Structures are given as C-alpha cells and as structure tokens.
Image (cartoon, rainbow, N blue to C red):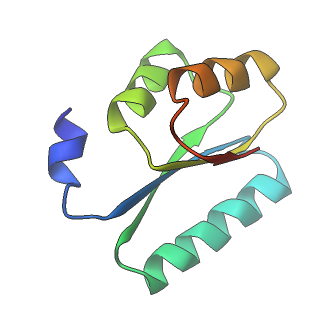
Amino acid sequence: MALNKIYSEYSYRIALVIDGSSLIGQRLMSGLCRRATAYPNLLVHRYFAKPLVQESVARLIDWEPDALVVYCDDVSLLRKIRTALPHAPWWP
C-alpha cells in the first residue's frame, strides 16, 4: 500500500515483467522507458522474471498496476500473476 501512496499522482501504472537476459525483454524495457519519458503520467515498474520470488509477486500485487507487459517463458509464473491481477489488461 505504501507504493500506491507514493505514486498516487501518476495516472497510469504499467508493470513490466521480463526475462532480463533476453534481447526482446531489453527492447521492451527500452521502449516503455522512452514512452514513460515522453508521457510524465506514465509510470513503469520493472520486475525480472527469473528472480521473481513470492515476495516480489506480493509487491507486484500490492502495487496494483493498471496494465501488465509480460515477456517470459515460465508458464506457472504467468498463471500466478494473471490470477492475482485479473482486472489488469496485459500483453503476454
């Protein structure tokens, strides 16, 4: 809940869950960061898929993103995130 209070002035939160070692994940991160720089009401928070443990998933859920961009090959992680945040649109 603390993160929501800190970033309450932002109108749109996007959670980016990527495999940090992949080139496509790095390009997604770069593109979203450029977009966030151009639009100050956009806040992007990055989560790496490989070390995403239960505490990180809980932080992601507590942050309550408005949208998810997910690029990883861990199907169980995708299901866990999707069931925890059913309201958030996402682009797998």
- Residue name at image x 43 percent, y 17 percent: 55
Residue 70 picture quarter = top right
- Residue name at image x 71 percent, y 26 percent: 78
Asked if 83 appears above or below 27 in the picture, the reply is above
- Taking the image as shown, residue 7 lies to the left or right of residue 68, namely left
Quarter of the figure that contains the C terminus = top right
| Foreground pick, 18 / 68 | 68
| Foreground pick, 61 / 29 | 61
Q: Position of residue 88 (x, y in %)?
A: 53, 41
- Residue name at image x 38 percent, y 38 percent: 64
Q: Position of residue 37 (x, y in %)?
A: 45, 80
Q: Is residue 83 visible?
A: yes
Asked if 15 appears above or below 27 in the picture, the reply is above
| Foreground pick, 26 / 90 | 90
Residue 33 picture quarter = bottom right
Asked if 78 appears above or below 34 in the picture, the reply is above
